[in-house]
Image (cartoon, rainbow, N blue to C red):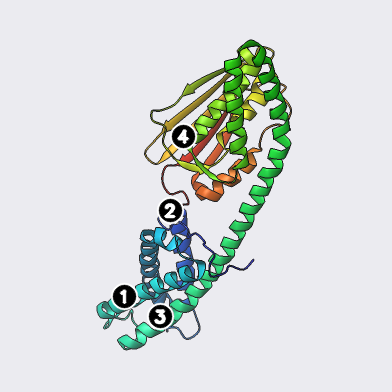
Amino acid sequence: MALSSNTRVLLPAFCKGPVILRSLVFAQAVAIVLAFAPGAAEDPWLHLGFTSLFVQWIMLCTSAALCLLRKPLNELPALRQGVSVMAILLLVTTLVSITAHVLLANSVWLVPLSKEQFVLQNLLLAMIIGLMAIQFFMLHTERQQRMLAQSRAELVALQARIQPHFLFNSLNTVAELTQQDPDAAEQALLDLASLFRAALHAGDKSDLRREVTLARQYLALEKWRLGDRLRVQWQLPEPIPELPMPALVLQPLLENAVRHGIEPLPDGGCISVQLSVHKHSCTLLIINPAPSQPGSKGNGIALDNIRQRLALQFEDAARISSAVVDSEFRLKVQLPIEGGKT
């Protein structure tokens, strides 16, 4: 899949630790190759020390510039973005080369070259390495786009399987409510419409506040269907942050809790939803009973699909973990407050 000049791609978050670490490892690999290349220097270990310091400074300064300029760069088409990144790399290389030559011109660390020769040599190397890095980044971008397309296709397939089951149950509930409580039946239809409207836009982005509202509407429908068998405890902060996230994340997790934790029990049980907001992260904890004979495995959106969609937006900054503790199934979703893909 080729990227045209009008295609928009997203730079990685160069302010984040994992990206910085990968950049430093890449820079050190380049320094080792340059230091031990045939004819590079009489003492390759001494040359490695200087080259490592020099290359790492270029990498750190370039990463800092890309971190600060990430937002405007992400607004550019792919071709202009690549040219801009290359220009930043060459500018940083020029500044670091001039500084190194001025400070180390008379030391054993520097090969005896004029300032112009030294700068031009480094610019040529930076251009070659930069082109290789950009090509690698383009391949990584293509892989992410394929993963996104696959994730959306899986989501659509899963929705096609889930919606009839949930629709029939909800319509049966509304039919019963029309005889008992017309106002409640009307509200149930409105909640059902909101859920299916969200399902139609499942590939779009949402935020935590809208996800909580959608989850409340879903549980309200299930409450009408299950009655006293379903009890829900909400522990939410006020106000709920408008944290950007993929659509249809919270509701499917609660659907799993209802299907596998409440429905198999004759007396039902309680679902606890706890949301805690910290300085750099937001933690969502869902607790439901864990019956010894859980319900059907075919209901609910697979956790792997949700993990994949969160990874596409937040990379490895978002985490989902689960465990059974004291006959309770505990599912924890951790999202970053800042640093998600924009």
Q: How many marks?
A: 4
Looking at marks 2 and 4 on the same chain, the residue that comes earlier in the sequence is marked by: 2
139 over 333 or under it: above or below: below
- Label 3 vs label 1: CA separation? 11 Å
9 over 250 or under it: above or below: below
- For numbered disc 4, what is the local secondary structure? helix
Q: Which residue is mark 4?
A: 209
Looking at the picture, how far across and down is residue 16, in whole percent?
A: 43, 53
Looking at marks 3 and 2 on the same chain, the residue that comes earlier in the sequence is marked by: 2
- Label 4 vs label 1: CA separation? 46 Å
- Label 2 vs label 4: CA separation? 28 Å
- For numbered disc 3, what is the local secondary structure? helix
- Label 1 vs label 2: CA separation? 25 Å
Looking at the picture, how far across and down is residue 100, in whole percent?
A: 30, 76
Q: For residue 324, say whether it is visible.
A: no
Label 4 environment density (alpha carbons within 10 Å; few <14, some 14–19, many ≥20)? some
Circle nearer the viewer, 4 or 3: 4
- Label 3 vs label 2: CA separation? 27 Å
Question: At label 4, which amino acid type do we have?
Answer: Arg
Disc sitting over residue 17 in the figure: 2
Residue situated in front as seen by the camera: 59 or 333: 333
Label 1 environment density (alpha carbons within 10 Å; few <14, some 14–19, many ≥20)? few
Q: Which residue is mark 1?
A: 95
- For numbered disc 2, what is the local secondary structure? helix
Q: Which residue is mark 3?
A: 123
Question: At label 2, which amino acid type do we have?
Answer: Gly
Would you identify the image quadrant in which residue 182 lies?
A: top right
At 25% from the left and 80% from the top, the residue drawn is 102
Would you identify the image quadrant in which residue 179 lies?
A: top right
Question: At label 3, which amino acid type do we have?
Answer: Leu
